[in-house]
Image (cartoon, grey):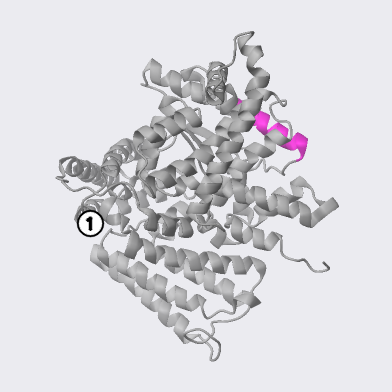
Amino acid sequence: MIRNIFLKLALAVVLFMVAFTGCKKDGGSGTGPLLGKDDEAFIKYENTFLDNFWKLNPDWATSAGYHKYDSLMVLPNEQSRDKLVTFAKYQVDSLSRFEVNTLSEANKIDYKILQNQLEYLQWQVRQLKQYEWDPSSYNVIGTFAYILNEHYEPLPKRLRHFYQRMSFIPQYYKDAQKQIKNPVVELTNLAIEQNLGGLDVIEKDFADSLKKTNIPKAEQKLMTDRAAQSVVAIKAYADWLKALKNDHPRSFRLGKDLYEDKFKYEIVATNTAEKIYNAAVERKKYIHREMAKISKQLWSKYFGKQAAPADSLQMISQLIDTISTKHVKPEEFQSSIEQIIPKLNAFVKAKDLLTLDPSKPLIIRKEPGYMAGVAGASMSGPGPYDKNGNSYYNVGSLAGWSKEKAESYLREYNNYILQILSIHEAVPGHYVQGVYSNKAPSIIKAVFGNGAMAEGWAVYTEQMMLENGFGNNEPEMMLMWYKWNLRSVCNTILDYSVHSGSMTKDEAIKLLTREAFQQQAEADGKWKRVSVTSVQLTSYYTGYKEIIDLRDAYKIKMGDKYKLKEFNEKFLSYGSAPVKFIREAMLAKTSGN
């Protein structure tokens, strides 16, 4: 049965190639005839491309809200990777047969996005080879959780897809074991943590959901039996990783060459990773100077006549430590966030910064187990095909933490930072950007959303809200925002220094605690994160810097006609495209200029 599915997937690619070969016209440039030179032809190409792309990537399809292939799973082996590379090469050739300069601005951006993604896919398989050294890349649970939790189809239908999909799990993890060679130790530990952490989805949540349906008992028995077999397979994978003899593990450091290439494909920035790193170093110096000014202003308020330390970083740190004692109780962490969101909505409306859509609710929830281990708070938005799906603000739980660890964490997310965090993750940050992205007409921009644009927007909105008076212009809020902005800046410095250089854990902790004023728990968590991810940490500062630079240039272009709301909404109207491409479109000469 598994083999037959692979044959179907391979046949789908072949048929796709034959179909397009048959409708090509004579003439044109590139390695073959033009597929077409107008927008209508390109849009038809995009739609056909995506359907065939999803056949080869059913997990991605499900998370994107494309549910035609929910019951399928691609096994992780050389066969499936070869099919993806063959597909990508063919599509690069097909793209080259369009006259890109005749396309609309929106379709030009789509063209560039597709071109980058197809080249990135080939590079990942042929050069990066993460499938060999990253055991955490083998984890099926997220897709199953999506099928279970989203209400895009009646529950019985979703549960049957869940059941059909589980049939692949034992072979999936057997194939995964065959791919792994000298894995990264940190990623091995993460794989164990996340696979075991998400078992409840299959072991408990699936059975609970079955009880809510009228599926016949005999059929339910088959379904729960398969779930039990799936749990055994996942636990066996975790046990195999625990027992794996790994005398020569790969370093978690990516290395400079791979890092620059990954940055180029993933961030799609105007500058190289090294230049962004250099800009981040300069930004850190600027923030330190501004924080010193505010700290001198606030010092007597908190310390009276006590002399301030001569070391400006020590002075800033001492003041931050004092202000950070104002925080919520551990058990009130999530409920406090729930109370902040309405205040943010009201401020955005009062200042007319953006148009908000009340028909797209935000659900604040405890972070699911299968997502644990990387970040304390995150957004999960609906897929581009599930525009009416739920948006989740995932909040990490402090349950079971020691008193000391919880205190350190809550000092980091004190009363000021908690508000800034919610601007970033929710309003008008990720949540709002996701709503606008799903309204954009281009499905390509939504499917292949640029992480630096999304993270950059979230960081930009923090500054925008404070510029417009959020926090009542309190110097404490400004000081804490600079501290928070240092996270983005130092994320870039840390990530580049670790993966392109040789920064040690001690050096990283010193950077984060002394120069970024982070609590020990936050710094420890960031070291874990940089040891199991690469490049993504640079997306915050890179995107933020490019958006601020674009806004400055757009102000000059528009002159007296410039309005902040118009800039924000125009920027978001392009969907989740790289800022580099949005900049080209927004600064282009308009008709009549």
Residue 97 shows in this picture? yes
Amino acid tagged 1: Gln
Quarter of the image with the N terminus in it: bottom left
Quadrant in the picture for residue 83: bottom left
> Which residue lies at the image location 69% right of the left edge and 42% below the top edge?
356
The magenta stretch is 339-352
Question: Can residue 345 be found in the magenta stretch?
Answer: yes
Q: Secondary structure at mark 1?
A: helix
Residue nearer the viewer, 165 or 74: 74
Quadrant in the picture for residue 419: top right
Question: Can residue 476 be found in the magenta stretch?
Answer: no
Quadrant in the picture for residue 208: top left
Residue 507 is situated, as x and y percent measured from the top left of the image, at 38, 34
Residue 34 is situated, as x and y percent measured from the top left of the image, at 54, 84
Residue lying farthest bottom?
26
Residue lying farthest top?
305
Q: Which residue is mark 1?
A: 179
